[in-house]
Image: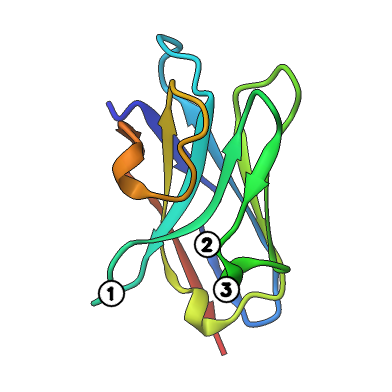
């Protein structure tokens, strides 16, 4: 089983909202860095948001600012991604990533542990 398990992907119409969840399948590690990435068909995987779970500091690529919010409730292990005003261009497989080291940021190479993804499809 993958170390992280995503859920919440769905098919929605443009302008709608979704909240994705990511839960560790085991609790071997404290993930001090967690992030969301996405990969659309025929495109490279790209960062969506990252969270330093100790400080609560979130980071987003400029292209994702404003419509996406990453969060994790204090004392809880589930990572969320709230996506508002979805566009067809947001259609992709969304992946959760985690790492025990803090401050891993938005680079895929910095994350050791991954989920298998959850599909988001936005229709116009």
Residue at 52% across / 33% down in the picture? 103
Check the image and report above or below for 50 versus 10.
Answer: above
Judging from the image, the colouring scheme is rainbow
Local crowd size for mark 3, using a 10 Å CA cut-off: few (<14), some (14–19), many (≥20)? few
- Percent position (x, y) of residue 15? 70, 80
Please state, as top left, top right, bottom left or bottom right, where the N terminus lies in the image: top left
| Image mark count | 3
Check the image and report above or below for 61 versus 35.
Answer: below
Say which of marks 2 and 3 sits in front: 3
Q: CA distance from mark 2 to mark 3?
A: 22 Å
Say which of marks 2 and 1 sits in front: 1
Left or right: 31, with 4 as reference point: right
Q: Which residue is mark 3?
A: 63
Observer-nearest residue: 89 or 61? Answer: 61
Left or right: 124, with 117 as reference point: right
Local SS, label 1: loop
Local SS, label 3: helix
Q: Which mark is residue 10?
A: 2
The residue at the far bottom in this view is: 124
Residue at 34% across / 39% down in the picture? 110
N-terminal label among 2 and 3 = 2
Q: Which residue is mark 1?
A: 43
Left or right: 48, with 115 as reference point: right
- Percent position (x, y) of residue 92? 41, 68
Circles 3 and 1 in contact, beta carbons < 8 Å: no
Local SS, label 2: loop
- Percent position (x, y) of residue 70? 65, 47
Q: CA distance from mark 2 to mark 1?
A: 20 Å
Say which of marks 3 and 1 sits in front: 3
- Percent position (x, y) of residue 60? 60, 57
Local crowd size for mark 1, using a 10 Å CA cut-off: few (<14), some (14–19), many (≥20)? few
């Amino acid at each position: 089983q993958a170390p992280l398990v995503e859920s919440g992907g769905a098919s929605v119409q443009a302008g709608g909202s979704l909240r994705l969840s990511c839960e560790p399948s085991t609790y071997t590690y404290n993930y001090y860095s967690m992030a969301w990435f996405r990969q659309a068909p025929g495109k490279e995987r790209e960062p969506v948001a990252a969270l330093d779970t100790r400080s609560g500091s979130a980071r987003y690529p400029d292209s994702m600012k404003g419509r996406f919010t990453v969060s994790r409730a204090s004392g809880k292990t589930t990572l969320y991604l709230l996506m508002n005003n979805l566009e067809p261009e947001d259609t992709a497989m969304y992946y959760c990533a985690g790492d025990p080291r803090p401050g891993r940021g938005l680079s895929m190479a910095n994350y050791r542990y991954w989920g298998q993804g959850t599909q988001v499809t936005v229709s116009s």
